[in-house]
Structures are given as C-alpha cells and as structure tokens.
Image (tube, rainbow, N blue to C red):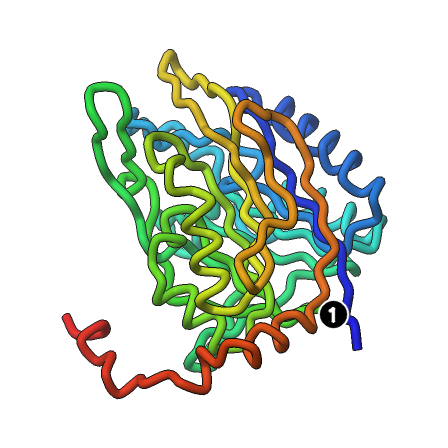
C-alpha cells in the first residue's frame, strides 16, 4: 500500500545582518513552498540566521540565539498550523543554562506544536542539537570556528510525526555513517540534512548522499544554503546542490550548480523503504558484534 507524502526543501540564498529582513525573506520562500501543499517543509542550517561561523569569533552573534519557544519558532508554529504542514526549522538555540548555545533544529507539527524527539536510550528532547562541531581552516580564505559558538548535543533523536518517522542531521554530521545508521535502526524513514556547506566538499556532496541513502535504505532530504553571504566584511560561498534521494540512492530532485533561492519538491512513497530493505538485505545481514571498535575510544 502506497504511503505517499510531499516534501519541500527550501534552498535559501544569502542572508544579511538584519534579523527582520532575514525572517521576512524566509517567510516569502515558505509561502512559495506551501503553494504545492507539502506535508513537510525543510530549511537549511541555522534557518533564518546567517551562518556566522566563518572565523570571526565575534561574541555579538550570541544575541541572535533564541530559546526553543522563542519568537521565530512562534512565527513558524503559526504558519505550520495555518497551512497544516510539518516544518523542520534549524535555529541558533539558547540553552536553559546561561552561556550554553547550540546549533539546533526543531520539528513543528501541522498543529503548530513541537514534536518531541526520542534518543536511542529513550530520553526525550525538545530539539535536535548538532553533535559533531567542526573547526578548520582550508587555505587562507575559508575558516570555520563553530566550536567557539556551539556546545555539542546529546545524541541522535528520532521524531514520530503524523505521516513519517524522521531523523535530522545537521551539516557536518552527514559525514558520519554511524549517525545515519543509528537513525535508521531507530525507525527513521526520512533523514533530513540541514546544511550550510561551502568549499571543496561540493565535489562529494551528491555521491555522499546517494551512498548513505542506499546503504541505509532510507529517504534523504538535504537542503543547503547557496550563494555568496557576507557578514562583517567576511564572505563565504555556499554551493547549494540540495537534493532529495530515494532509499535506493536515486536522485528524485536536485538543485543545479549556481541555483540560489529555489524550492525542491518531491513525492515520497514511504513503502519504498520497506521495499529497499527486502530487495537488498542490509539489515538482515548486519553483524554488530564486529563493530565494537567503532564505539571504542
């Protein structure tokens, strides 16, 4: 029996130093996305906030952080309720303890309520928080300083929504096959990747998504930022290449190089997850007793 859902991935262009302008711009993109009546709408990493982790180490950006019930979440909760769609909204999260900040995402259901995530050990979380925090310098121009801003998360939760069970990986996390497998083993039918990715890794972008989708027999919805974004006289160029992949590694929809503000849509038949896992028995034939070295420190 077909279980068809429609997803919309919003590949946004460059943002600015003006929070209101950024919010209005993303709301405009959202209004375009819902014209196709999607069941799920997905935004890139940090959502309506520019990606400021580009070597500035500027503490003024902490003022952009919000609690999980903050004003931006409230705006999109109303939109989710108005249009009856589930929204996966990444955001810069201010933690409950003063001085804790996270690169997070919240899942808002079609009634405007947050969906509670469940970690593999059964603990519940309000948001998914990025677990792998990058920090690097590629040549003279490209610097990432996420460790200055973000505390690490506590694991990989799944979110049981009305039409599908989903998992969320944030940018750098897509490079960890263990993260994909944990979410898939805990029942995720769709793995959403919220990206703000630049640099030479564009060469690996689509093949990485196709391989992990096929190896785990799971749908993937990856949405990246795009274009040249400038913050405080420092710029980074995001390569876009957002894509929607099926459980056998086939591309259902993909942004072209050079695309900026675009919206990808696709219909996903969730029964294809079961079909893929009984055509190629990657779960039946697992040998976890061999994998202890993966979790060894």
Q: Residue at x 78, y 72 (%)?
A: 2
Is 189 left, or right, of 135 in this rendering?
Answer: right
Is 77 left, or right, of 286 in this rendering?
Answer: right
Residue 54 placement (x, y as % from top left) = 33, 28
Q: Classify mark 1: residues with Cα within 10 Å, few (<14), some (14-19) or many (20+).
A: few
Number of marks present in the image shown: 1
For the residue pair 73 and 103, the one nearer the viewer reads as: 103
Q: Residue at x 54, y 48 (%)?
A: 222
Is 162 left, or right, of 194 in this rendering?
Answer: right
Does 45 appear above or below 291? above
Residue 206 placement (x, y as % from top left) = 47, 44
Residue 129 placement (x, y as % from top left) = 43, 56
Q: Where's the N terminus, which quadrant?
A: bottom right
Q: Residue furthest left?
A: 297
Q: Residue furthest front?
A: 279
Whether residue 5 appears in this view of the structure is: yes
Q: Where's the C terminus, which quadrant?
A: bottom left
Whether residue 116 appears in this view of the structure is: no
Does 238 appear above or below 7? above
For the residue pair 284 and 33, the one nearer the viewer reads as: 284
For the residue pair 198 and 2, the one nearer the viewer reads as: 2
- Disc 1 element: loop
Residue 42 placement (x, y as % from top left) = 63, 47
Q: Residue at x 26, y 88 (%)?
A: 289
Circle 1 residue: 162
For the residue pair 123 and 219, the one nearer the viewer reads as: 219
Q: Residue at x 69, y 73 (%)?
A: 271
């Amino acid at each position: 029996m077909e279980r068809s859902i429609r997803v919309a991935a919003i590949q946004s262009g460059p943002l600015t130093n003006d929070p209101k302008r950024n919010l209005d711009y993303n709301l405009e993109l959202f209004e375009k996305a819902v014209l196709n009546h999607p069941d799920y709408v997905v935004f890139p990493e940090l959502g309506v906030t520019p990606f400021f982790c580009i070597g500035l180490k500027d503490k003024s950006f902490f003022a952009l952080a919000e609690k999980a019930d903050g004003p931006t979440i409230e705006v999109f909760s109303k939109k989710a309720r108005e249009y009856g769609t589930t929204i996966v909204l990444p955001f810069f999260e201010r933690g409950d303890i003063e001085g804790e900040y996270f690169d997070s995402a919240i899942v808002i259901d079609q009634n405007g309520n947050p969906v509670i995530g469940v970690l593999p050990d059964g603990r519940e979380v309000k948001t998914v928080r990025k677990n792998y925090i990058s920090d690097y310098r590629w040549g003279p121009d490209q610097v990432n300083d996420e460790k200055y801003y973000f505390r690490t998360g506590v694991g990989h939760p799944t979110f049981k929504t009305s039409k599908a069970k989903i998992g969320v990986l944030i940018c750098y996390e897509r490079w960890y096959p263990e993260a994909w497998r944990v979410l898939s083993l805990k029942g995720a039918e769709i793995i959403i990747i919220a990206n703000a990715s630049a640099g030479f890794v564009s060469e690996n972008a689509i093949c990485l998504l196709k391989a992990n989708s096929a190896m785990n027999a799971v749908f993937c919805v990856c949405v990246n930022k795009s274009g040249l974004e400038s913050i405080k006289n420092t710029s980074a160029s995001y390569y876009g290449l957002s894509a929607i992949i099926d459980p056998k590694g086939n591309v259902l929809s993909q942004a072209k190089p050079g695309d900026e503000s675009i919206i990808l849509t696709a219909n996903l038949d969730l029964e294809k997850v079961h079909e893929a896992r009984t055509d190629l028995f990657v779960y039946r034939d697992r040998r976890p007793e061999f994998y202890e070295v993966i979790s060894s420190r």
